[in-house]
Amino acid sequence: MLGTNEKLEWIQLSLKYFLPELVLVGAFLILLLSSLVLNKGHQKKSIDWIALLLLMATLMASVISWNQTTANIPLFSGMLTQSTFAVYLKLLFDVAGVLTVLLSWKAYEYRKAEYYALVTCALLGAHVLVMSSNLIMVFLAIELISLPSYLLTAFVFSKKSMEGALKYFLFGSVASAIMLYGMSLLYGITHTFDFTSEVFAKAIYYQQTPFFFISVCLILAGLLFKIASTPMHPWAPDVYEAAPSPIVAFFSVVPKLAGIGILVLFCLAIDLKGNSSIRWYIVLSLIAILTLSIGNFAALLQKNPKRMMAYSSIAQAGILLIGAITLTNQGLQFMLFYATVFLLANYLVFLYIGHFERKSIVDMESYAGIGKSNAASSILLLVGLISLTGLPPTAGFLAKVFVFSSLWNSYEISGQGLYLVVFVVGLLNTVVSLFFYLKIPYQSFLKNGSNTVPSENSWGVNLLGFLLVITLLGLFFLPSGLMGWLNRITFAL
């Protein structure tokens, strides 16, 4: 047992590596106070800048943490662990936070301070989740993401948004309850909540029983809910359609990447470095196949862009799972490369879905002919959709090549036929995705429509879109810079 002085020293050391999270806590408090101090007229002018500066400060704090972190560092008596894997994901979350503010700049005006405060709260939950090495912290962090997400879904304050928020809340509550029950069962088996400890590893090594398998599957149910993966995906289409476009972009990236991060760590723990008698890659492979197939084929039937992107996001979760199936360093590094590209492309697409939505373009048919009156916006949107499809010369092509090449390498080394099945299904689903991702460009450039949307006041949107497109093209032609960062990451518990 540690004495009081040792505990205080540990807390002091932990706070040194907890800087981004402390900045987020400060940002949350400042945004709440801003809603009380600033009058409504002044708040509309100032709050976007305040939120942007605070989230930029969080991003800089995460960069400092990246430079400080070279190995796994236990924090707060081992409840959290600072690692290069966690810090890189936190960098992605913070980039997503900054992009969410930029997408919300003119898109949303009502109660802006509370709106941004909820975003920072969800970001804090994502930060804590990927650092968690204790099942209690995993549950608390997931709830810290979920509770503000329910409120953000309803922030349009319409009947549809309220209905979407209620569905999200009910489905999330059930998923959390199932996960918590699974955690209690797993604690009964291992007598510890620390899933990265030797005690946990030794306990499950001798307890490879159906009871253990059931407890893990219950926990996986809660984690799959966060990444909108089959069979825990039905909430996504209604929530995506109901929520504000910037928040949909946020939902499609931050909770998903946080969920995949903790899922990887948990699977590394229960896999016992490949010594588990339960072949967890079979479970993950089947989930990935179903997620890819359901997401892509359901997206083909959608006429609303947000619902289409919801099913797209489900299918993208399947691609991320493919990167995590083998649990090898190469596979996980390529998964992070894909996650980075996915973040940029998804925000690019939602930037323009929200932009056209404000001009009353809300379904596929209403995009007909707008490529003529809004050529720049339509072309930039096209690049984002091409990247999500995985076509050159965008980084989405390289990202998918990396993920599938890693899976193929694992198949050649292990000879596991299931890897080959996942590989083939993944490639076929990539072809399927081409048909729904190009629906909007087809309407925009090849169909004639009565909608003539004026292109004025689009320079700010197009500037941000242009920067995202340049980044996606740059990662295609010069991926070595990002891969250099990813090669620094270790995935040991």
Image (cartoon, rainbow, N blue to C red):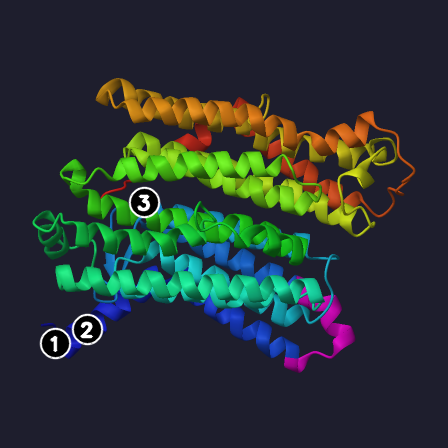
| Crowd class of label 3 (few under 14; some 14 to 19; many from 20; radius 10 Å) | some
Identify whether 397 is placed above or below 35. above
In screen coordinates, is 209 left or right of 367? left
Q: Which residue is drawn at 37% across and 60% down?
A: 128
**How far apart, in angstroms, are the residues tagged by discs 1 and 2?**
6 Å
Q: What x and y, as percent, mark residue 122?
A: 49, 62
Please identify the quarter of the rendering in which residue 462 is found.
top right
In screen coordinates, is 150 left or right of 289? right
**Position of the N terminus by quadrant:** bottom left
Res 479 seen here: no
Lower sequence index among marks 3 and 2: 2
What amino acid type is highlighted by mark number 3? Val
Q: Residue at x 69, y 78 (%)?
A: 38
Stretch of the chain drawn in magenta: 36-48
What amino acid type is highlighted by mark number 1? Gly
Identify whether 282 is placed above or below 112. above
Q: Do the residues labelled 1 and 2 touch (CB within 8 Å)?
A: yes
Q: Name the residue under label 2.
A: 7
What amino acid type is highlighted by mark number 2? Lys
In screen coordinates, is 332 left or right of 391? left
Q: Which residue lies furthest to the bottom in this view?
A: 36
Q: Mark 1 points at which residue?
A: 3
Q: Mark 3 points at which residue?
A: 264
| In this rendering, the label closer to the viewer, 3 or 1 | 3
In screen coordinates, is 342 left or right of 46? left
Lower sequence index among marks 3 and 1: 1
Q: What x and y, as percent, mark residue 446?
A: 81, 25
| Crowd class of label 2 (few under 14; some 14 to 19; many from 20; radius 10 Å) | some
Mark 3 residue element: helix
> Residue 42: within the magenta?
yes
Please identify the quarter of the rendering in which residue 326 is found.
top left
**How far apart, in angstroms, are the residues tagged by discs 3 and 1?**
34 Å
